[in-house]
Amino acid sequence: MKRLIPAVWILFCASLASAQTTLTFDEALKRALAVNNTVESARAEVGVAEAQRSYLLSAVMPKITVNGALTRNSIEQTFGGEGEDSVTILPHNDWQYQVVLSQPLFAGRRELRAYSQAKIAVQNAREQSQGTDDAVLLRVASSYLAVVNADRRLDVERRNIELAERRLSQARAFYEAGEVTKVDVFRAETAQKAAQRLLAAAQQQREHAVAQLRQDLALDGAVNVVAPAQTVAAIPSEEELVRRAQASRPDVTVAQNNLRIAELEIQKQRGYWLPTVTFDGGYISQKTPFPADQYSFGRVNFSIPVFQSGEVIARVSGAKQREKQAQYALADIKLGAREDVRKALADLHSAETSLTLANDQLAAAQAEYEQAFELYRAQEATSLDVAASEASLADARRAVAEETLNRDLAQLRVWYAAGSIKEAVGVTK
């Protein structure tokens, strides 16, 4: 029994190590938004912006402080007569405390401008978080489709091995019958080994794609994927995609917000020409009865700038230049968004054309191979003819697999360029 328990434990651990995760396309994308560290880090930045907004709001809210002091003097000084008629104006041991309320009343609306800028910064953090979501979705979708393509390539290479084994069997039969030389058998064996080598390379590519997927989805162990029936929604017109990109892409929205922040900065700097007004109110209690041991007060403080040696003018001028930079940046980002959509559409059209041609190539190569092999079996064609048609068929199969991946990735990039990848893949979170 003692020997049986370790053996069972080893088998149990081995079963856990060999556990596999099976994912669908939708599950992978939803999991990416739930567990990806890059996504979580971007969302935490929204909290940082919210905290900064709250901090700036506190600058215009009232504040209450309590100040106190305990003093030991070297002498004690009284004023007036003697006994009860005397007033101590400097006690030997003195104490005093005060409660003060401070409230800013007016500061050229600078705090209001800063608070408005902070609110826009929160919006920017949210937009940047959305941009991170989109980028992670594109990366995860690309990795997922790369794994799907790797599975497709593995199937292609296995079928190519079957072609090589079919020719090898035929060559051996001819050789045993004395119809061909040993060279035909060697050629067939060489083709078989080459096909097996390509199968190993395809397996390596799959492992690389799975590694990226595991990293993005915080998984461990083997991963199996289910090929999606449809990757993304139908592609709308170029005009619609450009409109979406220039209206709702996160980087465009951030640039628009930055322009608004620059405009507020000009107004904030102009506020330094205006006076600053604050109010202080408090209650004081002290041991010294002179002038009174307890009293309260209210005070309005104001500061009026009279001459600042051109400081505010320089600040306003600098803020205006930042506004121009923000305007140029917004225009450039909108142009970039438009051209990103057009380049993505051009890549998609090219990928679709290549896929169509690859399918045509595959049909022709399949027909060529079938005819060449039948002629080879009838000894009306040489092994070199079969080898050439076999290689053409294998290349055509690989081309269809690769162009299918390129088409799917191009569709994703079109939606990403338009800033609508979540809508395209059906992720609403």
Image (tube, rainbow, N blue to C red):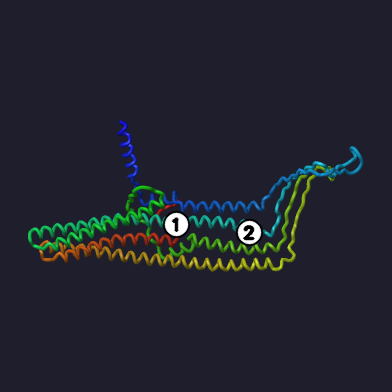
Q: Tell me the quadrant of the picture where the N terminus can be found.
A: top left
* Rendered view: 351 above or below 41: below
Residue sticking out furthest to the front: 74
Considering only order in the chain, which callout, 1 or 2, is on the residue closer to the N terminus?
2
Q: Nearer the viewer, residue 387 or 302?
A: 387
Q: Residues within 10 Å of mark 2 (few under 14, many from 20)?
A: many
Residue 244 placement, left or right of 229:
right
At label 1, counting other C-alpha atoms closer than 10 Å, the crowd grade (few under 14, some 14-19, many 20 or more) is many
Q: Residue at x 26, y 55 (%)?
A: 155
Q: Amino acid at mark 2?
A: Arg
Q: Secondary structure at mark 1?
A: helix
Residue at x 69%, y 48% (from the top left corner):
63
Q: Position of residue 234 (x, y in %)?
A: 37, 59
Residue 354, position in %: x, y? 31, 65
Q: Residue at x 38, y 51 (%)?
A: 214
Coordinates of residue 32 in the picture (x, y in percent) = 42, 51
Give coordinates of residue 176: x percent, y percent: 9, 58
At label 1, which amino acid type do we have? Asp
Residue at 21% over, 57% down: 161
